[in-house]
Each structure stands twice: as structure tokens, then as C-alpha cells.
Amino acid sequence: MPELPEVETIRLGLQSHSAKRRVEVATADESRLFRHNTSGGRAVLDLAEGRTIGGWSRRGKFMWVSFEGADPVLVVHLGMSGQVLCNPSDKASARKHEHLRLELDNQMVLQFNDPRTFGHLTVSEMVKANGRLVPAVLAHIGPDPLENGWEESFSWKQLGASNRKVKTALLDQTIISGIGNIYADESLYRAGIRGDRTLRALTEEQWVNLVGHAAKVMEEALSQGGTSFDALYVDTQGNPGYFARSLNVYGREGQPCLRCGSTIARTSLGGRSHFHCPNCQN
DNA sequence: ATGGGCTCCTGATGGC
DNA sequence: TGCCATCAGGAGCCCA
């Protein structure tokens, strides 16, 4: 459920509340969130317990936390319903879907909650991919629009000859990472392009403009703390984001387009909802 | 090469 | 009030 702005909001909270703190007690359950580790949650406990947190990094929708004196990192993906809360120990009672708990030496507790367990918690070595040091399990993930120099690293030449639909390409994390269903629809609206157009039907200029809108809308969302529709997405302190009020199309089926007054439509594309203005986008 | 369908899960919501 | 269908900020399969 969280896309780049939401994950970055969480990362910032984790960095400020847990960096340079020592993990005194770590506990994990048998959740399939740990499925990518050969020894399940045990691998995470062995890595974290007794170690000091170095810092939190991010690429797209993935975060990872390093520990001082350890080579591997812990990669965190939140899937559709993952949360990481950071609260003082007296306000961190166990939750129904708490799968990992890190108790820090500053009396703060990190709680990893995920009802649907579509995310994962994976111990991974760091490798060099496309000139950047990233966890090996993320080597196939492309750079995100908020990274420096990201635009040079994907090839329009390769994309442009494709019959793929524009929205499918935006959502493909191996090309550009961090964009999910909300911000894909919002950037397509801003660019005036329907998501079911093929890449072949676009000019390079249109594609670059579209991706520029994706970067812009995600930056704006980040400045508002991300998009919350309900209690599923909250930051590390449990607060919602306020960007939902700035959405132009996502979730607005049947309501008037804020630009032209036409009725916002919702179609299905790639098995997901595609909200768009039939008049402004073509 | 591309896309549709399906899967992993729980929970919120709306119609009857 | 309950019961059932539908849908959800993700992503990786398999198969046509």
C-alpha cells in the first residue's frame, strides 16, 4: 500500500528515532514475512540483537537498515498493509499483527506490523548494481525519481519501441521504482495521457514529461507526509499523511474533473483500477 | 514480448 | 443485525 512518499516518510522517522541506538531485545514470530531467509525470523534476530543500528536507506518502495559491525542488512518491504511504528516502550503494547519487535537502548520500540503479510523482512548482503551499493535482493530494482542522476540510467530507446501500456511501464519497478497505483494515475492525469496508451504511441518528450510529473507529485506528497485513506498508512508515530486532499483523480470516480468538469472514470488496467479524466487525458 | 489471471492474506465497506 | 460480495497504496508467478 505505501508508495515512495509513504515509505520515505517512514524512513525519515526511523532514521531520527533509531539510528545509532543499540538493539537490546529482538523478538520475531513465525510469519511468512521472513520467508526469504533460510532460517526465517532467526536470521533477523541474529543480525539485529545486541547490534547498533547504523542507518536507514531507501530505493523506491524498499528500505534497508544497516547494523554496525555487520555486512548484511535487513531489507524491509511493506507490501500492501505493512507499518513500522516507533514509540516509547510504555506505549508499544503488542499488536495483533506484530511480527518483529526491536527494543532499543533509548526505551523506544520498533514494531513491524502487517496484517496481510504481502511484504517481507529479508537479510541480504550488499552488492554493487548500476554503480550503487544496494542489497542483493534489490539488484533488479531500478532507481527512483528522487535519487540523484536517476534519469540517465534508463533507456527511452529501449522503452519507446515497446507495445507495453504506459501505466504498466510506470508501475514496473525494474524500470523506475517507487511509483504505485496512486501516483501513476496522478502523474498520468497531470501529463494528460491515458494509461492505456502504448509506449510506441508516445514521443520521448512526452515520456520524459510524464516521468517528471511522477517525480513532482511524489515530492509534493512527501512534503504532506504521504497519502492516507484510512488507518492503514501512518508514519512511525502513528500520524496520517495529508496528501489525499490533493489527489485529482485517484479514488474520485463519478466526481467532476477539477480542470474541465467531466466525470472522472474508472477502468481496469493490468488488473488494477485506473482513474482518469476521459476529456483531459488522451 | 505482452498482458491477463491468479496467488499470497486480512479487513473495511456496502448492498440486501 | 448478519451475511456475502467486492475491493484495497504490491508484486511475482504461469500461461496463452
Image (cartoon, coloured by chain):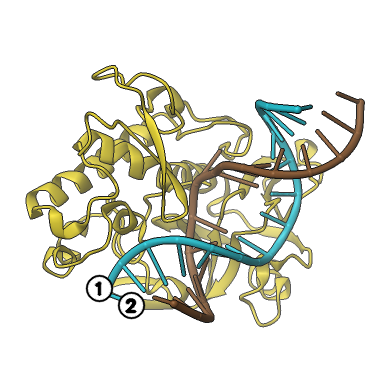
Chain colours: A yellow, B cyan, C brown
Local secondary structure at mark 1: loop
Q: Chain of mark 1?
A: A
Among the 4 quarters of the image, the one containing residue A280:
top left
Q: Is residue A118 left or right of residue A107?
A: left
Residue A225 appears in the figure: yes
Residue at the image point whose x is 29% and y is 17% from the top: A261
How far apart in space, not on screen, are marks 2 and 1 (Cα)? Answer: 6 Å
* The one of A205 and A232 positioned closer to us in this rendering: A205
| Residue C9 coordinates in the image, percent (x, y) | 50, 46
Closer-to-camera residue (A134/A206): A206
Q: Report x, y in % for residue A197.
A: 23, 51
Q: How many marks?
A: 2
Name the residue at 47% across, 33% down: A227
Which percent across, then down, holds residue A78? Answer: 56, 54
User: Contact, CB < 8 Å: mark 2 with mark 1?
Assistant: yes
Say left or right for A124 vs A154: right
Disc marking residue A119 = none
Q: Nearer the viewer, residue A94 or A209?
A: A209
Image mark 2: chain: A
- Give the residue number, with chain letter if any, for mark 1: A131
User: What is the x, y in percent for residue A92?
Assistant: 76, 41
Q: Looking at the picture, which amino acid does disc 2 mark?
A: Lys
Circle number at residue A128: 2
Which residue appears at 66% of the width and 65% of the height?
A33
- SS of the residue under disc 2: strand
Residue A170 location, quadrant = bottom left
Q: Amino acid at mark 1?
A: Gly
Q: Residues within 10 Å of mark 2 (few under 14, many from 20)?
A: few
